[in-house]
Amino acid sequence: MRSTLAPRTACALLAAIVLTICCAAPASAHTKLASSDPADGSTSDDAVTAVTLTFTLPVTPVGDTVVIDGPEGPVGTVITQADDGAVVVATPAAPLPEGHYEVTWTVAAQDGHPLTGALQFSVGAEAAAPPTSHSGHSMGSMRHEPSPVVVAVGRLGNATTLWGWLVAAGGLVFTALALRGRDRHDVPAALAALRWTGALILGGLLLRLVARSVTLAHGDLAAAVSPPDLVDALAGTTGLVVGLQAAGALAVLLGTGRSVRGSVAAMAGVALAGAGFVLDGHSNTMEPRWVVLAADVAHLAAAATWLGGVVTLAFVLRRRRRDGRDLDAALMGTRFSVIAAGSLAVVGLAGTLLAVAMLDRPAQLWETEWGLALLAKVAVVAVVALLGAYNHFHTVPLLTGATTGRRHGRSSGDALRRSATPETVLMVAIVLITGWLVGASMDG
C-alpha cells in the first residue's frame, strides 16, 4: 500500500500543477517597450525634436539611458520621464537633421531586471543608406550584448545567493525542530557549518552585481571594476534588494552561535535576506499583489525548510558516520519527514500560483526558454518529491518500527543517509534552474 501511495501522490501533485497552469487565465504584467516615437523603421519628413519611449510599466533610468547615434556620431540628449516613470523622453540639444539614426536604450524594470533594446529611424525621405561607424562597422551592429560568460556569471551569482539563503534558513529550522533531545549533541556543529552560508550569499551577490554592471554597460568588461557603473547596477529596486541580502548575510555570518537561542541575530539575518528575495524577481510586478506576495513568501519559506533540511540532515548523518557514532536517525528522520511532507505540499501549491501569475498564456511554457526551464524545474522537483515520499513512507517507518530490530534500523539509517546525497544533488540542479529563471526574460 505504501509502495504505491508515494508515486500516486507525487503524480497527482504534478498533474494538478500542470493542469492549473494550462487552464488558468493570464494574470501577469511584464515591463516591455510598448511604443516609440519615432517608431522603429519609420521615416520622418520633419526634423525630430525628441525620442519618446513608452513602457508598459514604470522604469528607472540606468547609465546614459538613451543613446542616439546619427550620421555625425553620438547625439547629446537630456533625459526626462513622464507618466509616473512609464515614459522616457530623450531630447537632443537641436532637432535631428536628415539622416539615419539608431537609438539604444537601457532601463531597469520595477523588479530590478535590466532591459535593453535598440531601434532605428530616418529623417528625410531622401536620406542615404545607414552610415558606418568610425570602426567600419554598420550602425546596426553597434549594440553590444554581454557575452555568454557574463550571462553565466550573473546566473551563477543568482543561484549561489539563493542556495546560501535556502540552506541557512532551512538549516536553522531543521536545527530548531529536528535536533532535539539526544540529537542536540549535533547542534553546535550544524550551526557552525550554517554560519558560512552567509559568506556564500555575499559571494553570490558580488558575482551578480559585477555581471549586471557589465550587462548594463552593453558588454564593456571595464564596468566590472568601475564605481559609477557598479552604482548604476544598483538602480531601481536592486539597491534595496542587494542591501537587504547583504545585511542578512552578514548577520548570518557573524550572528550564528553555538545554540539555537544564541543564533537570534542569524535568524533576523535570514528574515532580512528573505525580504530581499521577495522584492526581487518577476513576481514583484504581478497582480493581484497581495496574492502573489503571500504565494512568494510561502514558496520561499517552504522551499528553504525542505532544501535546507535535507542538506543539514545529510551533514549530521555524514558527521556521525565519520566520527564512528551510531546514526540513530529514527527520531530525527521522523521529525523531518513530517516537516518535509508539509513543505512539499506548500511548494507545489505556491509555485503553481506564482507560475499562473507570471505566464501571459499557457503556450509560454513550451514557446519560450523561460517556460521550458520552468517545466524542467517542475520535473526535477517531482523526482525529488518521489525520493522524499519513498523515505517518508518506507525508510522512516523502518527506522521507528518496533519490530524491525536493531540491525534493520542501522541499515535503514544508512539508506536515509545515502538517499540524502542524490536529493542534495537534484536540489542543486533546482536552485541552478531557479537562478536562471530569476535572471531570464519570460518573452519568447
Image (cartoon, grey):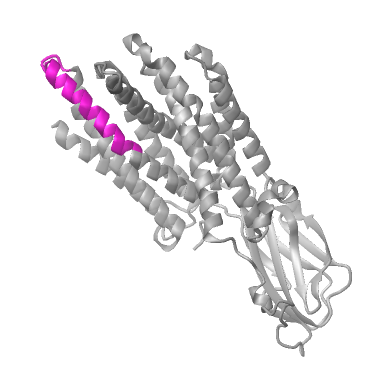
Find residue 245 and report its image quarter. Answer: top right
User: Dividing the image into 4 quarters, which one contains the N terminus?
Assistant: top left
How far from the left and from the top, in percent, is residue 140? 65, 76
How far from the left and from the top, in percent, is residue 201? 54, 35
Residue 338 visible somewhere in the drawing: no
Residue 232 visible somewhere in the drawing: yes
Position of residue 250 relative to residue 51, above or below, is: above
How far from the left and from the top, in percent, is residue 241? 62, 39
Furthest residue toward bottom: 126
Find residue 303 and report its image quarter. Answer: top left
Question: Which residues, given as a range, are shown in magenta?
Answer: 401-424
| Residue that appears at 75% across and 54% down | 83
Furthest residue toward front: 323
403 in the magenta segment: yes
Q: In the picture provided, is 407 more to the left or to the right than 430?
A: left
Dominant secondary structure (helix, strand or loop) of the stretch shown in magenta? helix
Q: In the picture provided, is 112 more to the left or to the right than 67?
A: left
